[in-house]
Image (spheres, rainbow, N blue to C red):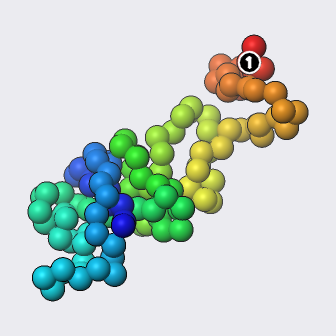
Amino acid sequence: MAHYAFLDKNNIVTEVIVGRDETEIVDGVSDWETAYGDYRGQKCVRTSYNGRIRYNYAGIGYTYDPIDDAFIAPQPFPSWILNSNKRWEAPLPYPEDNKRYSWNEEAQSWDEMA
């Protein structure tokens, strides 16, 4: 079983489906990205839960970057920076004291949650 993401004209994920494994051949078809894309009239790109391909599992609203061949989540806050693993990082590391925090964009800090 494999997962595939459909992209709009701006490379934004519109849907993710479960489909045929890329090693499966049915009626001579083995390129499932192309087959699903042709069927739907949208670009189709494989994604994986474990992130071994394309960095992150695709989700609706994610962007596909064809240059880096990566799915990228929407930026959570303007100050956050995309790291080399194609994940967003806050300007300050998350505190490591076993408490819960939420990011305060205005103060550029982690605020302890009650």
Q: Position of residue 114 (x, y in %)?
A: 75, 14
Please give the name of the residue rendered at 12% of the width and 58% of the height, measured from the top-left corner: 41
Measuring 22% from the left and 52% from the top, which residue is drawn there?
A: 9
Q: Residue furthest right?
A: 97
As drawn, which residue projects farthest toward the bottom? 28
- Is residue 3 shown above or below 34? above
Picture coordinates of residue 92, whole percent (x, y)? 76, 37
- Within the image, what quadrant is residue 44 found in? bottom left
The residue tagged with tag 1: helix, strand or loop? loop
Q: Is residue 10 visible?
A: no
Tell which of 92 and 73 is nearer to you: 73
Residue at label 1? 113
- The quarter of the picture where residue 100 lies is top right
Identify the residue at horizontal 62%, vertical 39% (top origin). 80
**79 sits left or right of 93 in the view:** left
Q: Is residue 106 above or below residue 34?
A: above
Counting the numbered discs, the total is 1
Q: Nearer the viewer, residue 27 or 42?
A: 27
Q: Position of residue 69 (x, y in %)?
A: 43, 66
Does residue 86 appear to the left or right of 74 in the view shown? right
Q: Residues within 10 Å of mark 1 (few under 14, many from 20)?
A: few
Identify which amino acid the numbered label 1 is placed on: Met
Quadrant of the drawing holding the N terminus? bottom left
